[in-house]
Amino acid sequence: MTTGMGSQTGSTLVKRGLADMLRGGVIMDVVNPEQARIAEDSGAVAVMALERVPSDIRRDGGVARMSDPEMIQGIQAAVTIPVMAKARIGHFAEAQILQSLDVDYIDESEVLTPADEENHIDKWAFTVPFVCGATNLGEALRRIGEGACMIRSKGEAGTGNVVEAVRHLRTIMTQIRRLQSADATELYALAKDLQAPLPLVREVAETGELPVPLFCAGGLSTPADASLVMQLGAQAVFVGSGIFKSDDPVRMAKAIVEATTHYQDPAIVAKVSTGLGAAMKGFETATLEVRLAERGW
Amino acid sequence: MRRVGVLALQGDVREHVGVLERLNVRAERVRRPNQLAGLDGLVIPGGESTTIAYLLTTSGLREPLARALEEGLSTFGTCAGLIMLSTSVSDGRADQWSYGALDVAVRRNGYGRQVASFEAPVAVRGVGDVPGVFIRAPRIEEVGADVDVVATYDHGDGEHPVLVRQGPVWGCSFHPELTPVDRVHQLFLDSMSEALR
C-alpha cells in the first residue's frame, strides 16, 4: 500500500495505542468463526483465535503450537473487531507468519509449548504489536525491554481459577509501589533484584505504572472475577476457557463485558451475575501437573 | 469551571480525561444516564465502536445521548467516537447503528488492519501541523454540505477529510489524545465558548 508523506507504520505509539483502545474491554478466546461472531455480538473488544482453548490444551497434552492460518483467516473474515493470535515463546518464525496474515496483535504465550527456553522473540523487529504474560514486575519489564506493547498477568490458564492471576497482579502492583518509595540510589539495586532494565525501572518509579497497558488473563470465569481484577488495577481482561466452557456462553460473555465496564458498581455486577448457569468447572491449581505460568524467563 | 463528560464505557478514556484536565476543564466519566445532566460538552473516545454501541444500549445511555445530541450538546468523537456520531458506516456489522449527528459516511478500518496503522503529521486549519495517530482508523469517504472540513490528509491516494465539524459536533479519524499536543481538543473547547456567546 502506498502511504502519505512522512507516514510511519509500526511505531511504538501506534503499537501501544491499539492496547490503549482495548482498555475497559474483554478479549475472548474463540476456536471458530461461529464463536467469534458470538463474542462480537456480546460486546467483545477483540478475539483471540486459537485451535483449542487452554482447558482443552491442558486435557489433551502434547505440543501446542500456532493455529492453522486457514482457521485464523476464517475468524478474521467473520468479525470486524481486532483478531489476535498466539505464537510460542521464542518462536519468531510463527510470529512472522502471523504478521504476514495481518493479525492485529500477537500473544507470545506460555499457553503454547515454548520453542526457546532462554530467549523470547525480539518484538522490536515486528510491525505488529505483541502482548506477553508476566507473573511479576521484573518479568513484565524484561518483556517490555524486548518490545512488548501490552502486558497481561499469566494466571493459570484453563483452570477457571482466578487465584494465580490475582497473585500476579498484586505482585506487580506491590513491586511498583516499592519502586515509587525508593530513592534514586536504591533503584540500581532494585533493578538488579528485579532483573529488569534500569531505564524502565526508573520510568516506573517516576510514573507509578507500567509503560504499557496492564491487562489480566488466566482463570477468569465469572463477572465477579472481572470486577475483582479490574479493581486490583487491570485495565482490561482476557477470558479464555471461561466463556465457551460455561453452561450459557452468550449470557456469560455479555455478563463479563458489562461487569468489566461497571466493575465499580456491585449492583450492576449482581444483576448480570443472576441466573447465569454454571461457570466452567475448573481446577484447584495446587493439584496441577503442568503449571503454565512457570514458562517464560 | 466547565464540565465536559467523557463517555467511559470502553476505550482510551484516561487519555481524553488527561487532555481535558491539562486544558483546565473538569472532566467527568459518564457510565450512566444521570451523569449526562448539566454537562457543557461530551467526548466519545477511541475504542471499539461495536463494544461502545453494545454498552450504550445495555447501560440505558443510548436514548438519553440521542436526545442530548438533538438538543445541541457539544460533542467530540475520536476514531470509534467519530463512527458513533456519523450518518453512515460501511464495513461494519450488519446491525451497526450510529447517531447521525455528523453528516459523514465513514468506512471502518478504512486504512487497513493494525499492521497498516500509522502516524503522520496532519495540517489543521488555523492551527498548523499536529501529530496524527491513526489506529485501525475509520476513513471519512463522504461529507454532507453542512459539514466543515477542518483538516485533510493525503495517504498517497488524494486529500480526504480527517477532522470535521457540523455545528456543535466534531469528529476526528485520528487520536489527538495519544499525543502531548492538545490543540485539536482546544479547538473543540473554543467552539463551545462560541456557542455560549
Image: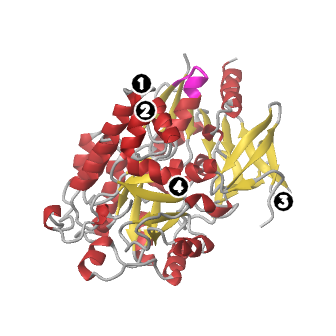
> Crowding at label 4, few (<14), some or many (≥20) Cα neighbours within 10 Å?
some
- Check whether the beta carbons of the residues at disc 1 and disc 2 lie within 8 A of each other: yes
Callout 1 and callout 2 share a chain:
yes
The residue pinned by badge 1 equals A183
Callout 2: residue from which chain? Answer: A
Q: State how far apart marks 2 and 3 are (Cα).
A: 47 Å
State the residue lying farthest toward the right.
Answer: B158
Q: Left or right: where does residue B156 sit relative to residue A283?
A: right
Badge 2 element: helix
Badge 4 element: loop
Residue A256 x/y as whole percent: 32, 55
- Where residue B47 is drawn, which disc sits there? none
The residue pinned by badge 4 equals A146
At label 2, the amino acid type is Leu
Badge 3 element: loop
Instruction: Work out whether B110 lies above or below B56.
Output: below
Residue stretch rendered in magenta on the structure: B20-26
Report if residue B57 is visible in the image: no
Callout 3 and callout 4 share a chain:
no
At label 3, the amino acid type is Gly
Callout 1: residue from which chain? Answer: A
Residue B71 x/y as whole percent: 58, 33
The residue pinned by badge 3 equals B156
Callout 3: residue from which chain? Answer: B
Q: Nearer the viewer, mark 4 or mark 1?
A: 1
Q: Residue at x 31, y 49 (%)?
A: A259
> Crowding at label 3, few (<14), some or many (≥20) Cα neighbours within 10 Å?
few
The residue pinned by badge 2 equals A187
Callout 4 and callout 2 share a chain:
yes
Q: Nearer the viewer, mark 3 or mark 4?
A: 4
